[in-house]
Image (tube, rainbow, N blue to C red):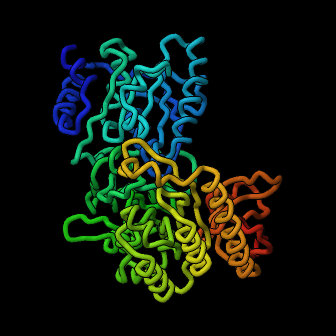
Amino acid sequence: MTQLVALRRSRAAGNADRQRSEAEGVAGALVGRGAPGRTVYIETYGCQMNIGDTELMAGVLADAGYARVDDPGRADVILVNTCAIREHAENRVLGRLGQLQRYRDRHADLLIGVTGCMAQRLGEALLQGAYGVDLVAGPDAYRSIGWMVDGMRRGAVEKGQALLALDADEDYGGLRAIRGEGVSAWVTVQRGCDHRCTFCIVPYVRGPEKNRAFSEVVGEVEEAVAAGYSEVTLLGQTVNSYRSGDGDFADLLHAVARVPGLRRVRFTSPHPNDVTERLLETMASEPAVCPQLHLPVQSGSDRILKRMVRRYTRRDFLEKVDLARRIVPDIALSTDIIVGFSGEMEADFEATLSLLAAVRFDDAYLYKYSRRGGTPATRLPAADDVPAAVAQTRLERTIELQRGIQLSVNRAEVGAVREVLTERIARSAGDLLGRTARNKVVAFRGPADWIGTYRRVRLTATSGATFTGAVA
């Protein structure tokens, strides 16, 4: 138990090797772990990376004897896999932790844990606060979560563990993921980030960039196809900076696109600086690669881009857009925009609006900036903060402009026939929802047994955000 006390207090990245050796020692002592009938419920917040991490944890826990259930009321273990990008996301999780305590009334031995980026950022504060949390585990601790959870439930490990050491070598090689429902498989190729954008918490909660071995990624895609998936999405914090051995992301994309039986490949989220001519040529030449590119710009102002440490200028970004549209003429582009960043003047904001108007993105994810503790932007002068009311007005203006652009762009596509991968039942009675290769969402009539299949659908109308269609 002395080792476990040390493990509970381990916080620094330099403790990763010690944490792993302690984990292996305790795991070996937990003979007979994972008795049949044990269950885990995992609730996921945040990005696609978190979905992939949830599937990874499900695999680790399955190996420890825990079956995943979709009802927290039926679970022996509840894990909340979290995001730390924005304060609002963390507040939602804290509120949810309070709600989950009611399940202790009928399950006295229930174990509740917080995993992911928020767990890494807040750490032991989640254990010390009145949140009813028994375990916190950061993004590099999932290999240990099976034996740790089972050890706590068996009384062999003290509750209140904090697994927070970041490990520069942990890419989760050799572990299997258990995929959730859906028709597209998430395949993580890269973890962490080497960029240091001043607004972003990710490098500090996920650590430096770690790329999986080329063969492992291709092998996981082959396994996904064998399991019935015809579409995969390659995931990474800056996915197109991937490199393994002599291969870069263009090489990986080429190899994945050639996996027999795979019909569609997507990837997210790339960094503009690593969008190369060779990558775009791979997208153009490989039929399985979807003609869709998410290209986060964040701001249209050079002054704000410099304060954000994005390492490109407005002109650089527009040149990448032109290059993408020249090499992949039918490409659909999306972006991220942050308004109200520290020091943003009205002229900076107008530059962002003019960039949106010039590029005419197919889609955009629009946010109002809020300070995140632990990011470099918190060291910028408080006097430079944009008043909340001004930032809100700017966000509303940006949304209004982008909605008009998106409606116009999508109206031009009405009447076209597109191949749609049917994903799920829509909210509207009798309809299904699917997605085109260009990432456009379409609702159309059809039976539920079409889910997971491809249909040729004529796009008959658009609301701007989505299309309605009819099977052609």
Residue 306: percent from the left, percent from the top? 38, 67
Residue 438: percent from the left, percent from the top? 59, 73
- Residue farthest to the bottom, as pictured: 326
- Residue farthest to the right, as pictured: 429
Quadrant location of residue 189?
bottom left
Q: Nearer the viewer, residue 173 or 408?
A: 408
Q: Residue at the location (56% across, 19% down)?
A: 101
Residue 157: percent from the left, percent from the top? 31, 16
**Does the rendering let one see residue 73?**
yes
**Does the rendering let one see residue 37?**
no
Quadrant location of residue 465?
bottom right
Q: Residue at the location (43% across, 38% down)?
A: 118
| 267 versus 317 height, above or below | above
Quadrant location of residue 216?
bottom left
- Residue farthest to the front, as pictured: 383
Q: Residue at the location (41% across, 56% down)?
A: 187
Residue 109: percent from the left, percent from the top? 48, 13
Q: Nearer the viewer, residue 435 or 31?
A: 435
**Total numbered labels:** 0
Name the image quarter holding the C terminus: bottom right
Q: Residue at the location (27% across, 52% down)?
A: 208
Name the image quarter holding the N terminus: top left
